[in-house]
Image: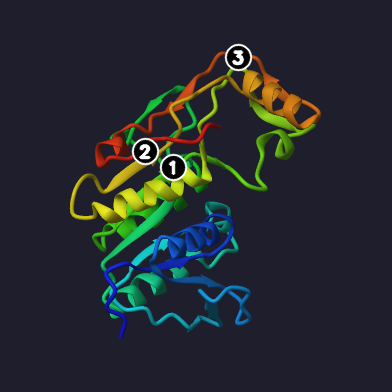
Amino acid sequence: MQTNKDNLVVLGAGWLGQALCIDAQKQGWQVQGTHRSDTHQFDFERQFVLQNGELQHQVDLQNAYWVCAIPPRSRDSESDYPQVLEQALKLATELNCKGFLLCSSTGVYDQEPGVYSESSDISGTNERQIKLYDAEEQVLEQQGKVLRLAGLLGPNREPGRFVAGKELKTSSQQVVNMVHQQDVINAIYAVLNNWSQGQSIYNVVNPAHPTKADYYAQKCELYGTQMPSFSSNEVAERKVIGSAIEALGFSYQYGI
């Protein structure tokens, strides 16, 4: 049985989760990161998959913190995400989990103009909001915690490339809510290392909020890509505030 106080299970070792696993190993954590396959590239990888409603898994790390890093886009109408999360919470309990942290999204907030913090009401007026909120409630009911992540950027995910030439259904004057991958990883550590303190929910959003027109102009110029077009130029600022987590000693170190 593992007794190391720094044990970590990462559910969903994809773009964010895999980076967290690699970083945590370098920090001296004992790590297991899950994916659907039973063939592994890294020594920390373990299978975790629902097949015909039955859980197939190779996770056996006792007394670990769990971080669910399955991306919100996996939560579409055909996804078995709610069942996966339910099984993960059950297994985490069986393995004496020390705390379960869900990586959610600032997409849970309304899309209307305004300033949003962790205490803002959530109307649940669209399907994506409802799915995000329901997942959060699953975790909070088990005394877990939630990080609501802004749009992610970092290695192999550069805004100047992924919006190049696209038609965006948003105003050019809307502000961006973004955060760098490494800041998210550091925010996860901040919550895990202060588990018994602070809030149950934190936003993780870089404090810079340039307009999308200015932001993407800079990024597209940097990468030599075509500017996206916008559906309007209406001033409609929707800003998510991510400063509350700084009370845990965390600070944003990486620009967007």
Look at the image and tell me in which quarter the C terminus lies: top right
Location of residue 171 (image quadrant):
top right
Residue shown at the point (25%, 37%) measured from the top left = 247
Towards the viewer: 29 or 11: 29
Which residue position holds label 1? 108
Residue type at numbered disc 1 = Val
Q: Is mark 1 on a helix, strand or loop?
A: helix
x and y, in percent, of residue 254 in the image: 50, 36
Which residue position holds label 3? 234
x and y, in percent, of residue 82 in the image: 45, 65
Disc with the residue nearer the chain's start (2 vs 3): 2
Residue type at numbered disc 2 = Ile
Mark 2 → mark 3, Cα distance in angstroms: 24 Å
x and y, in percent, of residue 55 in the image: 48, 82
Mark 2 → mark 1, Cα distance in angstroms: 7 Å
Q: Is residue 105 something one can see in this rendering? A: no
Residue type at numbered disc 3 = Glu
Which residue position holds label 2? 122
How many numbered discs, if any? 3
Q: Is mark 2 on a helix, strand or loop?
A: loop
159 to the left or right of 186: right
